Amino acid sequence: MNPERMSKKELADMVKSLREQLDGTGTPASLGTSGEDLYKILAQSSQVGFYIMQDRHFKFINSHIRDYTGYSEEDMLKMNPALFILPEDRRKTAKNAVMMLKEQRFSPYEFRIVTKDGRIKWIMETVMSIKFRGKRAILGNSMDVTERKEASRRLEELEALESSILDAIPQAVLGLHERRINFANHAVKIIFGWHREELIGKSIRMIYRNEEEADKIGDIFYSSLERQRTFETEFPCMCKDGREIICRMKASRIGEKLREKRIVVTYEDITEEKKAQEELERSRQDLRNLSVHLQSVREEESTRVARKIHDELGQSLTALQMDLSWLEGKLPARNKSIREKTRSMSDLVDSTIDSVHKITMELRPSMLDDLGLPAAIEWQAGDFQKRSGIRCQANIRCGEGIIKKELATTIFRIFQETLTNIARHSKATQCRVALTENEKEVCLEVVDNGIGITQWQIDDPHSFGIIGMRERAHLWGGTIYIRNVKPSGTSVKVMIPLGKGEKQK
Ligand SMILES: Nc1ncnc2c1ncn2[C@@H]1O[C@H](COP(=O)(O)OP(=O)(O)OP(=O)(O)O)[C@@H](O)[C@H]1O
Ligand SMILES: [Mg+2]
């Protein structure tokens, strides 16, 4: 056995057997030259330091002692043995030695020595009283435990560092073995209200709302950690005072395998964060609902006004037009100036009818209601080309009347906004619009050959046109993709999933 690895107990056992050997050969008092030989034999065969001291001087030392002190035997026999010991340890060592000699102490004691080259070493020692050359002497067994001391000091340091790290982090940290808590840091008090001492040794159930949930999360952890090193989740927990909280938990297994079911889990209270998130989501949803409501109110209002203008103004103008042509027919041919006046009145009524038609179309394209989205898109593209001079090519691959009216309005309004943007910002000479649809979704893409758009313009919180398009699409669970196209220009693509309710029956 390596003497460095020997424990206190082993040293004590060795000394005991030494004592027995000595006792077996007779009392120390009877030892003469043959006794001295025996000591030498024992010393040489000993695995640890072995010395005999008498009259404050070493009478004999073995090689192990020479090795750890660094002095030669000759030097050591001349020196005062107390001087090897570190000054601050001398008094305590002397006291321990005396107690052991009086058989008031049985376990080995430790002290530090200074070696010949000035290093400090830890020594563990036992002493016993013997008779040597007819006089009282001390027989000492000692060994160098510096390495072991150093290792345990390093371990202690590491443990202290570990526990200060664990105490410095704001999350509660629990070490678990077979679902029992065997470690807890100070933050458990802040998060769960329990003192760590109250938790250690207890079932992990202590921090959950009930037995079932504790079992459930335990099963989730253990089964996930079989496959991966770490696992993260959110789960409800319960504090000492019965308060329920939501925790973000990160679990990781201790060691390579989960065989021993030892894991460590950190708990972060995210109740407030969750609440704020939910609050934000709720207010976003409220805003969306409000915007849907406002849009539908606006659409309804536009439809109502468009219908009224169409029905009342349109009909009156048509009647007026008919009256005018009747009047024209009745007028004598020679009355040229009145005839001309009537003609110009009739032209004016015609152009007013046109204007009314345009206004009602803008308010609510009747085509959307009468012919459906594809025709309305085609008409709008043609109208845009006429008005802006920008060539607009429509490619419609979408069945008529397939898309529900409200969704058709959404897509149509988005289309109108993209066209307005093209006219206002793009400097394009032409644009293409494609409306396609399959089982799953409807897609509208408008591409122009203008100057293009920047990401900054797309993300600008003041781009209300784009925000409005996004919001409209979002209401139907759809998405808008805006990007630059090569060689130049902008593409706006809207994709809206067609759930059961979005198609017209
Ligand atoms: N087709 C396009 N080509 C080039 N730039 C564009 C195009 N569409 C939009 N933009 C840029 O994106 C910006 C944001 O567009 P958005 O529709 O949100 O706002 P707007 O048209 O300026 O104002 P609003 O639509 O609120 O009247 C525009 O100001 C413009 O700079
Ligand atoms: Mg705009």
Image: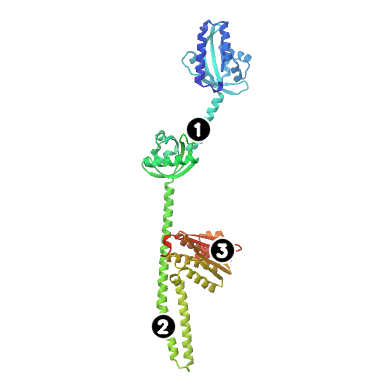
Q: Is ligand 1 closer than 8 angstroms to the Cβ of mark 1?
A: no
User: Element at badge 2?
Assistant: helix
The amino acid type of the residue labelled 3 equals Thr
> Which quadrant, please, contains the N terminus?
top right
Which residue corresponds to mark 1?
160
How packed is label 2: few (under 14 Cα within 10 Å), some, or many (20 or more)?
Answer: few
* Mark 2 and mark 3 residues within 8 Å of each other at the beta carbon: no
Q: Is 1 placed left or right of 352 in the picture?
A: right
Q: Is ligand 1 closer than 8 angstroms to the Cβ of mark 3?
A: yes
Which residue corresponds to mark 2?
319
Give residue 478's position: percent from left, percent from top: 47, 59
Give residue 283's position: percent from left, percent from top: 42, 56
Which circle's residue, 1 or 2, is located before the other in the chain?
1
The amino acid type of the residue labelled 1 equals Ala
- Find the distance from the CA under tag 2 to the CA under tag 3: 47 Å
Which circle's residue, 3 or 1, is located before the other in the chain?
1
> Which quadrant, please, contains the C terminus?
bottom left
Which circle's residue, 2 or 3, is located before the other in the chain?
2
Q: Residue placed at 49% from the left, 20% from the top?
A: 9
